[in-house]
Amino acid sequence: MASEPATQDRTGLDDIERLAPWFHNLHLPDGRQTAPHHPLGDFPRVKWRQIEPFLPQDLKGWRVLDIGCNAGFYSFELARRRAAVTALDIDCHYLRQARWAAERYALASRIEFRLGSVYGLARTDERFDLVLFMGVLYHLRHPLLALDILRNVTRRQLILQTLTSPGATYTDTPANIGLMERDALVADTWPRMAFIEHALEEDPTNWWAPDPACAEAMARSAGFRVVHRPGHEIWICEPNLTEATVDAELRRNELRAIFPAQ
Ligand SMILES: C[S@@+](CC[C@H](N)C(=O)[O-])C[C@H]1O[C@@H](n2cnc3c(N)ncnc32)[C@H](O)[C@@H]1O
């Protein structure tokens, strides 16, 4: 397919500059890149290389949800594997970039872009075979609520990626600790999540930094089981079909109370 030449507006800015700032470095069909000097390297291609071996090459028939799709890097890769992609983001700026890039890649027909929040999924009956939840959890004020919601919409796989803090990796905690055993909560091996009241890296929306053990424990507590750890701060999870039904029902009731049917 012939790629469109870069266009300039009246101010002399080309379309990449007009749509800046970019968080995703997209490699466009005409050879240009949207964020070639990204501080995290060729981002998020570096992360995609870690997760893509765990995904089927052909996702025909799969419904995929990319939460916090940003400029759409992951949505494009999944659409190329023939998935039907729903790309959700709360920020119009990023959705504008993603829609524009989808046209450049001729992938627009396979991706439905939606403006909205992860919390809005509490009211949906939709189910997705694969849910990408990459780089969003720590931006949320209510991360466990989001995971509970995602458990209800995930059919086969959830890919969770989050900023973490240094700390315990992969510990399991006892079924119960006594009131007088609370020293255990400050042991190095206890899962922890740091709350950031102000800002991290100048970003006041970075609210939480769980350590790896805590990220896993949160996923488990929301009804997932961790099946792979493909890289630093990334977990591939599946719905835990054997979770206690009482817990699951309580969580469902809680969600109904917070998000009553409209
Ligand atoms: C750090 S970026 C991660 C982008 C992409 N998922 C990745 O891993 O490269 C966080 C993205 O999540 C979006 N976001 C933040 N809060 C959200 C929410 N409540 N619901 C949906 N998207 C959200 C932001 O607009 C932003 O595009």
Image (spheres, helix red, strand yellow):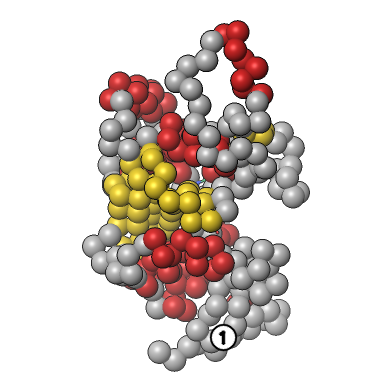
Q: Residue at x 71, y 48 (%)?
A: 203
Q: How crowded is the residue under tag 1: few (<14 C-alpha within 10 Å), some, or many (20+)?
A: few
Residue 141 point in image, percent of width and height: 58, 35
Quarter of the image for the C terminus: give it.
top left
Q: Quadrant of residue 34?
A: bottom right
* Residue 134 visible in the shown view: no
Identify residue for label 1.
31
Q: Is residue 59 left or right of residue 17?
A: left
Q: Is residue 206 left or right of residue 111?
A: right
Q: Is ligand 1 closer than 8 angstroms to the Cβ of mark 1? A: no
Depth order, front residue of 8/142: 142
* Residue 257 visible in the shown view: yes
Identity, as a three-letter code, of the amino acid under mark 1 = Gly
Residue 193 point in image, percent of width and height: 62, 34
Q: Secondary structure at mark 1?
A: loop
Q: Residue furthest left?
A: 61
Q: Is residue 171 left or right of residue 207?
A: left
Residue 253 point in image, percent of width and height: 34, 23
Residue 108 versus residue 156 in the image, above or below: below
Q: Residue furthest top?
A: 180
Q: Residue at x 35, y 45 (%)?
A: 238
Q: Residue furthest bottom?
A: 2
Q: Residue at x 52, y 52 (%)?
A: 234
Q: How many dots with numbers?
A: 1
Residue 172 point in image, percent of width and height: 49, 31
